[in-house]
Amino acid sequence: MLLRHNISLLRQSEVLTEYDPKRGVSVATLAYEYPSRSRVPEHAHGSDQLIYAISGLMEVSSGQSMWLIPPHFALWIPARTQHRIHMPGPVAMRTLYLRRDLAARLEPRCAVLHVTPLLRELIVEAVSVGQLRMRNHYECALRDLLIRQIQKASPIPTFVTLPREERALAVAQAILRNPAESKSMAVLCSEAGVGVRTIERAFHKDVGISFELWRRQVRLTKAVELLVSGCSIKEVAYRVGYCQSSAFVEMFRRTFGTTPKAWVLALETLGQQSTASQEKLSLAARRSEEV
C-alpha cells in the first residue's frame, strides 16, 4: 500500500482523516516501508492509533516528549494527538487505526507498550487483512483479540522530555546521540557555548528536573531498549555510560523497583503466556468465522 505524503500539507492545527476507519470498518491498517532518515511531519489522526515497526527503530515525538520505539515495543497514540516520526534507519511500519469507541478503556495519553509474540502476530494478520469490517465474523473476532491484547500489554515507562530553549536543546541532543557520553555538564555547556547555570535553569523550567536527572532518564530509556533486544546487563551498562554493572543495576532498581534481570524475566513470562494461549484464541477466531 502506498502512503501519499500529503501529511506535509497539513497545518499543525489540522487532523488527517484519510486513514481513519470508514463506515462499516472498526479497524483500518497501513503498511509502509520507510528508507533510512525518513521523516513524517507533525500531524494527528481522527482515530486512535497503534504504531508498530516489525523492523527498524522509530523516534516518535509529541510536544516536548520523545519515545524510542524498537520492534519489541509499540506506541499508543490517542486520537487528535499531534506527533511526528523520524526513522534513523530503514523501518517497516505497521499501523492500526481504531475507532475511538473501541479504545474507551485504554490509556488517554501516549504510551509505550510491550509487544508480545501474540500481539505481533495479531497486528501482522490485521494488516494482511487490510481492514476489519464490523459484519465479518472472523474480522470481528480478530478485532476483539487485538483490543484485548493491547489492553493487556505491559506499559513501558520510558520517554524523554526535551527542553524548548535552543541552547539547552543542543546539549540535550548531544546526549541523545550518545547516551554513554561521560563528559561533565561543564564540558558539554562549554562546547555548546553556554553557561552551566543557564542550562540548569532551562532544564528546570522546560523539563522540570535537573540536567543530571534528565541524562539518567535518557540512559534508562536506551537501557530498556537494549535489554528487550537481548543485550546482557554488562553490555547495557557499558553502552549507557556505566563502568560498573552494579551501579547500573542499582540505578535501574531505584527507578523501576526491580533489577534489570527480574524486569526482563517478567516480560518474557508474559510473552510465553501469550504464546501458550495463541492456539486457543486462533481456534476461537476460526469458529467465529464458521458461524
Image (cartoon, grey):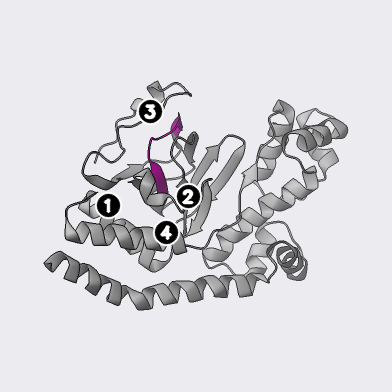
Q: The residue tagged with tag 4: helix, strand or loop? A: helix
Q: Which mark is residue 17?
A: none
The residue at the point 32 percent across, 63 percent down is: 145
Q: Give how far apart the Cα atoms at labels 1 and 4 are.
A: 15 Å
Callout 1–callout 2 Cβ contact below 8 Å? no
Q: Which residue is mark 1?
A: 127
Q: Give how far apart the Cα atoms at labels 2 and 3 are.
A: 19 Å
Say what amino acid the circle numbered 3 marks: Ile
**Relative to 157, does residue 41 appear above or below in the rendering?**
above
Image quarter of the N terminus: top left
Q: The residue tagged with tag 3: helix, strand or loop? A: helix
Q: Residues within 10 Å of mark 3 (few under 14, many from 20)?
A: some
Q: Give how far apart the Cα atoms at labels 3 and 1 are.
A: 21 Å
Q: Which residue is mark 2?
A: 75
**Relative to 171, does residue 116 appear above or below in the rendering?**
below
The residue at the point 55 percent across, 73 percent down is: 266
Q: Which residue is mark 4?
A: 150
Callout 1–callout 4 Cβ contact below 8 Å? no
Say what amino acid the circle numbered 1 marks: Val
Q: Main secondary structure of the magenta part?
A: strand
Residue 255 at least partly seen: yes
Query: Which label sits in the foreground, 3 or 4?
Result: 4
Identify the image quadrant of residue 241. bottom right
Say what amino acid the circle numbered 4 marks: Ile
Q: Which residue is mark 3?
A: 7
The residue at the point 46 percent across, 49 percent down is: 76
Q: The residue tagged with tag 1: helix, strand or loop? A: helix
Q: Which residues are magenta?
A: 40-51
